[in-house]
């Protein structure tokens, strides 16, 4: 199996305490029909029966030969009979363990799906309806399979939880065999949407964690990340919500100020800023002098992508008569940025804009000064007029793997569910890769490699409060805008909610992203100390 | 490993050309074009109104092409720069913004209109139902309607000299507000007042300004008023609608024409900003190409401006007065319509600013009526889009095609109108274009008045 056999000491392979059947139990339903099949082998048998039927359907000329040649040595032993039939027609599918391509998704398709489901998965990008039709065709085939297929999704979830629990216990051989079983079970569910799709990604993540933990979590080139981000931005409203909610707060905070400075913790393509520049251009009393400092990772190929974006924004600002200056700060990690690099002037009103960046600071080890405290400290020292914080509304920073797994399963299922409503291609497909990267980071990485350490709003409130920030009410304008824009242009199901001055956007009743605004508390004691 | 670059900020206003930058545009553009905010150089130089128009145009384009991202961004910007209680440009833009939102809501897949209405509290346009007094003071406030009234009444008075019975068909947006002055003038005729028959069509609450009483009630008030001036007034409502070219009205009038043709009755057809509700070619064009979208009976172009005018001609009226707003709202292209409407409807907002204080209730009512029109022009299509203004040149052509000949307004009429304009503030002007009169505000055409007789 994997390289961990020797490392596994105490993990026993006898089953988990949950409701999984004991290995030796014979399935009652089939026993009544005269066949002896073990419950744990049911899915494999069913899968093979299905394959056999397909083969028979596709090769009619050989059926008569089968009919005359075959002998049932032991008619009750279906499993081995089917196996022997299948061996003649289909070589067994092997599962290689090297899964580190950029085109992760299509690779998974070819590995996990046998002939039956191949077209199902591959077509799911192009024609959303085809998987459903294929699914219906599949359900016509074997009545033996039908009962199982309906609860395959539930079984998958169950098995995933069991697997996660084994991972947490360190029982990697069991985890590994569960993964193989799940990958087999995946062939019999529709992995184009719904629970099948979510399961596919989570089983992939588990597989990486168990089989190839030494492989780096796929992080990709920075421009690749920008492309993934841009598609995620287009495919669903979460980032757009983040941008116009933060922009609303920043615009209102800058009211009356003639020199303003925005510090963007993750510039990407600068998608957030054209709208703000335009709104500042036309505000009553005229636009302020706007400075934008964009932080981003250095480009590997020598391109200065920050500067390119800055120049585009400058061009836009010039065309609407807004005096504008841009500075790019290239840093691989936010904690490497020092406040003096931002060159904040005391005369200007500063807005710090953090869209899904603060959680990346939560992973430093216990020996170093916590990165989050450092960064929040220097943010405070800049005395910003407003700090806009947008974060995933999830608890993915728990130390126990099973807890993280469970939470991530719920969170990303909801997110994938909301993504179903998107019809833009290739945006939707690439957005899924973006989400997949996040999932892999949450589940497969540890230590400093795990940057997706999402925490819910309640925890951020505590952290920011403890760091000397007080919450600013996002205001009714932000809520009205968000509601209006989302109801106009997004599918039904998204909902904007307001909680104590913060806004969340979620899918049905589950908030998935939360936006809040903060301001440093002016502490007279500290100021007094500074004077001494 | 950390590296950082410090980019010196580009010198303000002296940013060098970017065309030869080694920008790797491929990867950025391959995904999607950057949100295309208007970046034309002219944008900033003409001031806010032009900017706002550009943003509205871009927003309309984004909505029409289903570019949700760009539409959202522009709507967000517009929401912030065009508050409903700002200056006249902002209020105008706000009206258009609401109309675009309504259009997006009508055409989009979302049906959450209530959620939107809650989120955007002022979205529902509540038009005021005017009492007669309120409508009269609205009419008196500016020459917008008084101009047409003055020109029409003067022309009518001249042409009915010698007639002892006159039949006025008043197709007017302002619900007979023109008539009391005319009755007064008729009462003071040297030869004594004629018998006046007054016919109106339609209801008082189809389009703004809406009245809080019915035509029957209004009619009895008018009859009483006329009696107080010793004028006999007969009042009649013929239920009829502009959407079918007032065909029931025409039919009735045709019968009357047969009966009264020889009796020396003057037939006056006074059209005051009503005819533009009659459908015209652009609506028929849609009907013919999209006949499946609309009900079958309107597939023929018979409900047509020209048909109405030709039918009118067969009645051999003594005079036809045609007064309407001088703008073109008929384009089937949303952006064209938006530009036309934006470049015309700033005028009523501007005049409101000049003549009414902020926060005044009347201003709210009048502006709500304008918003109704804006929403009709922008958010609706097909037969529901009733505000189909055409410029003077096209109406003149139609009248000529229907065998009418235009007549000059007399010098007396012109001086009457001028006299009326003098009662109002500076800014209003009068232009004579051949036989026609045009009311202007700050040099821009507002309303035209034309008079016609059978050719």
Image (cartoon, coloured by chain):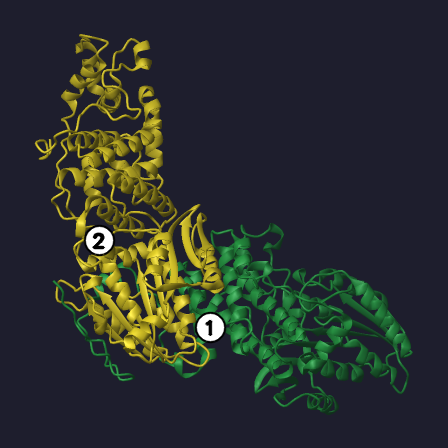
> Mark 2 = which residue?
A363
Colour-to-chain, green: B
Spatial CA span between label 2 and label 1: 42 Å
Q: Which mark is residue B81?
A: 1
Q: Is A125 positioned to the left or the right of A83 in the image?
A: right
- Whole-percent x and y of residue A20? 28, 24
Residue A433 or B402: which is nearer the viewer?
Answer: A433
Dot 1 falls on a residue whose secondary structure is helix
- Viewer-proximal residue among A38 and A366: A366
Q: Residues within 10 Å of mark 2 (few under 14, many from 20)?
A: some
Q: Is residue B119 visible?
A: yes
Q: Are marks 2 and 1 in contact (CB under 8 Å)?
A: no
Q: Is residue B398 left or right of residue B339?
A: right
- Looking at the image, is B390 positioned above or below residue A43? below
Q: Nearer the viewer, residue B81 or A420?
A: B81
Same chain for the residues under marks 2 and 1 in the image: no
The local crowd at label 1, few if under 14, some if 14 to 19, many if 20 or more residues have their Cα within 10 Å, is many
- Which residue appears at 59% of the width and 61% of the height? B124
Drawn colour of chain A? yellow
Q: Nearer the viewer, residue A477 or B309?
A: A477
The chain to which mark 2 is attached is A
Compared with B239, B296 (above or below) is above
- Residue A430 spot, x, y in % from top left: 27, 51
Instruction: Give the quarter of the image for residue A4.
Output: top left
Q: Is residue B335 left or right of residue A212?
A: right
User: Does residue B433 appear left or right of residue A443 in this picture?
Assistant: right
Residue at position x 29%, y 60% from top? B32
Please give the chain letter of the residue carrying mark 1: B
Foreground mark, 2 or 1, reads: 2
Q: Residue at x 81, y 77 (%)?
A: B180
Q: Which mark is residue A233?
A: none
């Amino acid at each position: 199996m994997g390289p961990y056999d020797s490392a596994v000491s105490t993990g026993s392979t006898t089953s988990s305490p949950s409701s999984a059947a004991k290995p030796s139990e014979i399935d009652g339903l089939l026993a009544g029909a005269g066949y002896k099949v073990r419950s744990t082998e049911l899915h494999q048998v069913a899968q093979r029966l299905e394959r056999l039927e397909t083969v028979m359907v596709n090769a009619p000329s050989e059926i008569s030969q089968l009919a005359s040649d075959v002998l049932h040595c032991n008619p009750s032993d279906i499993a081995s009979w089917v196996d022997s039939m299948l061996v003649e027609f289909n070589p067994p599918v092997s599962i290689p363990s090297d899964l580190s391509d950029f085109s992760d998704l299509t690779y998974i398709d070819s590995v996990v799906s046998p002939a039956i489901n191949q077209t199902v998965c591959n077509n799911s990008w192009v024609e959303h309806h085809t998987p459903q039709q294929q699914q219906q065709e599949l359900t016509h085939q074997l009545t033996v399979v039908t009962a199982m297929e309906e609860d395959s999704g539930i079984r998958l979830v169950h098995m995933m939880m069991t697997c996660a629990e084994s991972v947490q216990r360190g029982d990697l051989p069991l985890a590994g065999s569960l993964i193989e079983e799940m990958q087999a079970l995946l062939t019999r569910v529709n992995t184009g949407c719904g629970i099948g799709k979510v399961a596919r990604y989570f089983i992939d993540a588990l597989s990486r964690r168990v089989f190839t933990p030494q492989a780096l979590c796929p992080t990709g080139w920075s421009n690749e990340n920008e492309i993934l981000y841009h598609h995620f931005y287009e495919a669903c409203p979460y980032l757009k919500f983040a941008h116009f909610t933060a922009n609303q707060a920043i615009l209102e905070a800058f009211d009356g100020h003639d020199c303003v400075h925005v510090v963007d913790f993750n510039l990407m393509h600068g998608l957030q800023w054209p709208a703000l520049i335009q709104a500042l251009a036309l505000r009553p009393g005229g636009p302020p002098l706007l400075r934008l400092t964009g932080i981003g990772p250095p480009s590997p190929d020598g391109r200065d992508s920050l500067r390119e974006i800055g120049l585009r924004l400058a061009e836009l600002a010039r065309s609407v008569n807004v005096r504008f200056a841009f500075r790019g700060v290239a840093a691989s990690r936010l904690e490497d940025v020092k406040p003096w690099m931002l060159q904040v002037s005391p005369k200007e009103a500063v807005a710090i804009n953090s869209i899904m960046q603060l959680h990346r600071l939560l992973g430093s080890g216990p020996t170093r000064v916590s990165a989050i405290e450092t960064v929040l400290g220097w943010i405070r020292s800049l005395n910003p007029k407003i700090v806009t914080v947008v974060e995933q509304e999830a608890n993915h920073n728990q130390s126990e793997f099973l807890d993280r797994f469970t939470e991530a399963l719920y969170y990303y299922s909801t997110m994938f569910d909301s993504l179903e409503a998107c019809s833009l291609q290739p945006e939707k497909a690439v957005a899924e890769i973006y989400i997949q990267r996040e999932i892999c980071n949450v589940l497969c990485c540890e230590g400093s490699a795990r940057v997706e350490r999402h925490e819910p709003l309640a925890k951020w409130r505590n952290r920011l409060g403890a760091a000397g920030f007080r919450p600013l009410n996002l205001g009714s304008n932000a809520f009205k805008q968000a509601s209006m824009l989302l109801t106009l242009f997004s599918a039904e199901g998204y909902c904007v909610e307001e909680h104590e001055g913060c806004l969340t956007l979620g899918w049905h009743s589950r908030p998935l992203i939360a936006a809040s605004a903060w301001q440093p508390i002016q502490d007279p004691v500290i100021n007094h100390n500074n004077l001494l | 490993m950390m590296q950082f670059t410090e980019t010196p900020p580009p010198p303000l206003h002296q940013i060098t050309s970017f065309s030869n930058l080694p920008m790797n545009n491929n990867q950025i553009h391959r995904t999607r074009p950057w949100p295309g905010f208007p970046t034309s150089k002219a944008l900033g130089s003409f001031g806010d109104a032009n900017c706002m128009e550009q943003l509205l145009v871009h927003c309309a384009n984004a909505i029409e092409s289903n570019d949700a991202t760009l539409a959202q961004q522009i709507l967000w910007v517009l929401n912030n720069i065009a508050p409903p209680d700002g200056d006249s440009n902002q209020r105008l833009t706000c009206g258009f913004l609401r109309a675009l939102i309504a259009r997006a809501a009508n055409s989009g897949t979302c049906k959450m209109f209530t959620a939107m209405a809650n989120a955007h509290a002022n979205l529902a346009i509540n038009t005021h139902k005017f009492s007669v007094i309120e409508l009269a003071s609205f009419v008196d406030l500016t020459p917008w309607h008084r101009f047409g009234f003055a020109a029409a009444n003067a022309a009518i008075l001249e042409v009915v000299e010698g007639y002892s019975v006159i039949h006025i068909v008043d197709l007017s947006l302002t619900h007979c507000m023109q008539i009391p002055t005319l009755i007064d003038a008729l009462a003071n005729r040297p030869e004594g007042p004629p018998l006046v028959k007054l016919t109106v069509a339609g209801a008082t609450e189809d389009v703004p300004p809406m009245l809080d009483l019915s035509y029957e009630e209004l009619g009895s008030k008018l009859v009483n008023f006329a009696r107080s001036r010793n004028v006999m007034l007969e009042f009649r409502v013929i239920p009829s609608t502009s959407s079918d070219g007032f065909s029931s009205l025409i039919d009735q009038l045709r019968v009357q024409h047969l009966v009264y043709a020889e009796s020396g009755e003057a037939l006056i057809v006074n059209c005051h900003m009503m005819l533009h509700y009659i459908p015209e070619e652009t609506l028929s064009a849609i009907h013919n190409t999209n006949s499946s979208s609309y009900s079958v009976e309107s597939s023929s172009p018979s409900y047509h401006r020209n048909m109405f005018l030709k039918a009118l001609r067969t009645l051999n009226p003594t005079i036809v007065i045609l007064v309407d707003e001088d703008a073109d709202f008929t384009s089937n292209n949303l952006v064209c319509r938006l530009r036309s409407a934006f470049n015309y409807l700033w005028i009523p907002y501007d005049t409101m600013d000049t003549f009414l204080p902020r926060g005044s209730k009347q201003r709210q009512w009048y502006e709500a009526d304008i918003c109704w029109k804006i929403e009709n022009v922008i958010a609706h299509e097909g037969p529901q889009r009733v505000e189909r203004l055409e410029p003077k040149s096209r109406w003149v052509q139609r009248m000529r095609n229907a065998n009418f000949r235009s007549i000059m307004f007399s010098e007396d009429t012109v001086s009457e109108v001028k006299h009326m304009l003098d009662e109002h503030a500076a800014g209003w002007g009068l232009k004579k274009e051949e036989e026609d009169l045009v009311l202007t505000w700050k040099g821009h055409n507002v309303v035209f008045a034309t008079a016609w007789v059978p050719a």
